[in-house]
Amino acid sequence: MIAVLLLAFGCPDSIESIEPFITNVMNGRKPSPNQLQKIKERYLMIGGHSPLLDITKRQAEALEKILNATNELTPKLLNSKTPELFRVFVGMRYWHPFIKDTLNEIKNSGAENIVALAMAPHYSKISTGNYIKDVNIAKTELNIDTDISFINNWHTHPLFLEAVAEKIKNGISNFPPLMPSPLRGEGKGEGVQVIYSAHSLPKQLMLEDDPYAKQLNETIEGIIKLTGDISWHLGFQSKGMSPGEWLEPTVDSILDKLSKDGKKYILIVPVGFVSDNIETLYDIDIVYKGMAESLGMIFHRTDSLNDSPKFIESLSCIIRDHLKQVV
């Protein structure tokens, strides 16, 4: 049996769990009362908790189903006697189910191969790289002999690009029908301004050759081949509490500039996030939407990929392609 481990950031599952969750994120340092209150208010505005874990579990369930239904690998490749070749597990960095706990479950399942996939399409040592580090530490602590292979780069996989392009085309349909738009076959014009957003990272922690920003641009270039030439911008959001410089330009600075340039129609595409979470539901849907509307703009966000069929299909292909090289 092949175990697939989906890795995600984690999220508080209640208002009470916000403080220990943030303490984990801050490497054991508790947030100040003021910080904690502000964070609690944000979660209350999106329903009191993040849906990230529930969404990741749905992704795992759908992925396991499609892998076992359409896999191109046969049990004989692993000398496996199990009726299901794949089982998909979920492990989180900063809250339950923690990566170490999930790896222990995988260990007890008798998996013959383990594939780990961070649910973030773009690699950086201080983001995706830390997932890999945590998995390897847990592997050592649990004395797991089974090899664990990692899927690091899937930001230009054709089906992933198609899944995002599909959301963009649907997002464009929210705007007035008479507005010029290349996606409606009307050519360029004063149409939608697409802002691709991704999580900001602290510059001081990034290596000079860190591929994060480059991969984001490669993803966007691939998407444009599918959507047609649209006016786009790459912005960074959700800067953390650490001091120092973070990646720029910020999404809010782009909104401000576009407003001054007389642009009215804004579509945000959270290309760096595959699942809804506090960064999409609060930072984009509340903060950026409020800012855009205060500037007189018409603002929409594309639906997150979540467990949409095209995205799950892309993950299954990414995993199968990876296994053909390592099994």
Image (spheres, grey):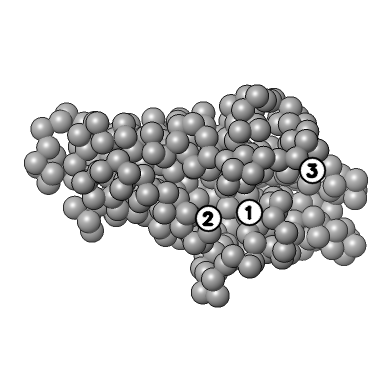
How far across and how far down the image is residue 290, in percent? 84, 42
- The reply to whether dot 1 and dot 2 touch (C-beta < 8 Å) is yes
- The reply to whether dot 2 and dot 3 touch (C-beta < 8 Å) is no
What amino acid type should be assigned to the residue bearing mark 2?
Ser
- Left or right: 150 as drawn, with respect to 323: right
Dot placed on the residue nearer the N-terminal end, 2 or 3: 2
| Above or below for 258 versus 93 | below
Distance between the Cα atoms at labels 2 and 3? Answer: 24 Å
Q: Residue at x 65, y 31 (%)?
A: 18
How far across and how far down the image is residue 216, in percent? 56, 62
Q: Residue at x 38, y 34 (%)?
A: 101
Identify which residue, 86 or 218, lies in the foreground.
86
Q: Looking at the rendered structure, which numbered label has been put on residue 127?
A: 2
Label 1 crowding class (10 Å Cα cut-off): few <14, some 14-19, many 20+? some
**Label 1, on which residue?**
199
SS for dot 3: helix
| Above or below for 217 versus 304 | below
SS for dot 1: strand
**Label 3, on which residue?**
287
Dot placed on the residue nearer the N-terminal end, 3 or 1: 1
